[in-house]
Image: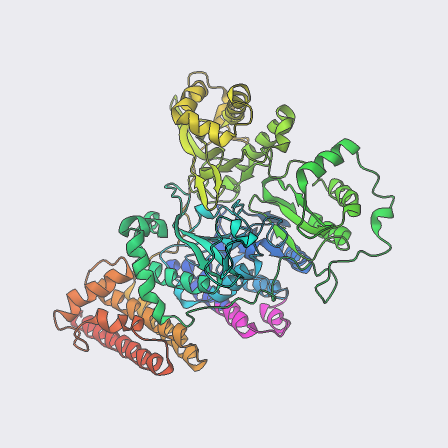
Amino acid sequence: MQSFRTELESLPNKNGKALVEKDIVDLDKKIHLFREGKMDEEKFRSLRLARGVYGQRQPGVQMVRIKLPYGKMTLAQWERISHVSDEYSTGNLHLTTRQDIQIHFVSLDRTPEMWAELEKDDVTIREACGNTVRNITASDMAGIDPEEPFDVTPYAHAMFEYFLRKPVCQEMGRKFKIAFSSSEKDTALVFMHDLGAIPRIKIIDASPDDPRLNDSVGQAVGRGKEQRGFKVVIGGGLGAQPHLAVTTHEFLEEDLLIPYLESVLRVFDRHGERNSRHKARIKFLIQKIGIDAFNEFVIEEQKALTHQRYKVDIAGVSGQVPGVRTSNTQHPTPDTTHPTTDNSHPTPNPYKFELWKATNVVKQKQPGYFAVYVRVANGNISSVTSRSLIEKLKDVIADDVRVTINQGLQFRFIKPEHLEYVYSVLESEGFAAAGFGSVADVTSCPGTDTCNLGISNSTGAALILSELIEEEFPEYLYNKEIAIKISGCMNSCGQHGMASIGFHGSSLKAKGQVLPALQVLVGGGVLGAGEGRIADKILKVPSRRGPDVVRTILNDYKTNAPQGETFLTYSKRNGDRYYYDLLKPLASLDNLTPDDYIDFGQQEKFSTAIGVGECAGVMIDLVATLILEAEEKITSSEELFANSQWADSIYHAYSAQVHTAKALLLQQGVQCNTQHGILNDFDKHFTANALYTEAASFKTQVMRMNDAEPSETFALNYLLQAKAFVEFAKEYRERAVLAEK
């Protein structure tokens, strides 16, 4: 086994290499400190989560989440991930609903080495977990969607790069999820995100008869030029308490999107809940203070930003550039000795091929090209299959593979004459199932296979339900409106909360025994334009009756819905009571069989074994640890100041003062919650009692960061203020410790 430092030496020489090296070396250092008992366990957990290293159900091993912005990976990156999975994991790649790839059963001690290996092809795990800006998702059709006003790919990529390692989003109260849809259809489900963006174009200064003004979002206010922008929604989320996002802007100019998000994150960081993780998402903050007050806070933050406007280089990254074995932006030209002539791939079954084309192939907006979708059961694909697909398809697909939000894959820029060959390759690998995105394409989180929070098995149920649709309802292979989604618990990683038919893992008791159960939800879905519908909770049934639930609901819809009525409309019209009465016989515990006590995919009787979740970072209430963290933030502030990054330097200095104030308050027995509350409490307990006399108001002293533009002079003075406050706290703590002896 090579040392990870050897891997670092072989990293490509690129912008940001020093930061990557520092990240990896720092992770290795912290692992050693933890192993030696020199780092608090909770502090270490918070740190490793922000580096994509997540605990799993099995002791002694980790899940590592690989961050793929908007789900894009090159063929080289896909091959690199496959190699890493072989070397450090089990050879399985798990595609997630956030367009990441997860690998499991990784040794903690080898994660720095593994990270260095991934970075050889610009693949990161930084901020894939923890209380950070998570992977930014986007419609898989971005860049090739015939209905998109423009390609959102460059904006998603710029946002990913801008906020990676950004001080404001390293230690928020909870995670923050962002999505870009490619059109008003909202295929990225922005309505269930902390922040979502839908592209729009406004025509400025046009004559009243300009044909471009017939769009509902067009408005003549300028000179006939197209102005790009976004509809912006905020505060959505699923989980145990789902919320629909609310609209903050019907049209926000493109250059204002990233500054707006930075202001939002600053408000969330300062005012967001930090004690109760179940109330710490931004949706709860907005619910508590109201959207108007929230928007006022956002405006207050804007002056302190580095960029009042941020221009995105739309030519630098594009979903329209195939880039297959070329150094330019031309569409890929297949090899003249194309493998379609290879007899090892016989002509496919005509019926199966046509069904696959009808359900898994879509036209791109680029004339003469098609995108192909691949159903991946439970999101699991092996490294062996991945490498085989790369080798066989590399000459006929773009160097741009997308992981989709329903755990599949998309290949793009395929010529029509190559579709049969692509199908034959997929069929030979066992990945030519028709019905991508259909009722049969069931979404599922890993559940009890690896997750600490899983209650009952979700992956086994998903496979059974997929088979049910294919065998008993084959006509639904064409139906992309009805979605079945399953989560192992109520947290909705499998997106059950917005499914047409949703399930989440649970348990029931009968005759003194526990049996696996599924909570049934009905009626969720996408309305478009950033709006959606949350599914209604109906009732619980024994897990083994999940297939009967689906049969009952679909047969009822087929029999009773008027011709042409969508399931979303039908289910809303009927309401939750209708489905409760319809499904109530399946919830009865009077006629249980021995199989009902055994979960899907298991041999032994069911038992609940729920661990501790790690989606949120943890509170570190040790005074010494907080002061140490403050000193680290001072160091980071100094480094950023030396690099002329005034705004980021100021924010680290701000965080150092908040951490320090919290440490002193905890030493006094004062419980802390939001950063805003810490500033108020410090004035109440220290400034008012003359324990701190450097300012009439500590809060005013700290918050002057929002009253000044981030200049070099202000950044220096603010950094010196923060350093002085940390020194004051250390001296105060030493006096207090001596007084206790």
* Image vertical order of residue 675 relative to residue 642, above or below: above
Quadrant of the image containing the N terminus: bottom right
Q: Is residue 25 rendered magenta in the image?
A: yes
* Left or right of residue 299: residue 58: right
Residue 181 on image: x %, y %: 52, 50
Compared with 35, 657 (above or below) is below
Q: Is residue 403 left or right of residue 456?
A: right
Residue pictured at 62% horizontal, 60% vertical: 318
User: Quick check: is 553 in the magenta stretch?
Assistant: no
Q: Image check: 513 left or right of 691?
A: right
Front-most of 511 and 237? 237
Q: State the residue at coordinates (23%, 67%).
A: 664
Q: Give the left or right position of residue 78, taking residue 40 as reference.
A: right
Point out residue 597 in the picture as x, y percentages from the top left corner: 48, 26
Q: Main secondary structure of the magenta part?
A: helix
The residue under the point 70% across, 64% down is 329
Which of the image's four quarters has the C terminus?
A: bottom left
Eyeballing the image, is 493 above or below 45? above
Stretch of the chain drawn in magenta = 1-26
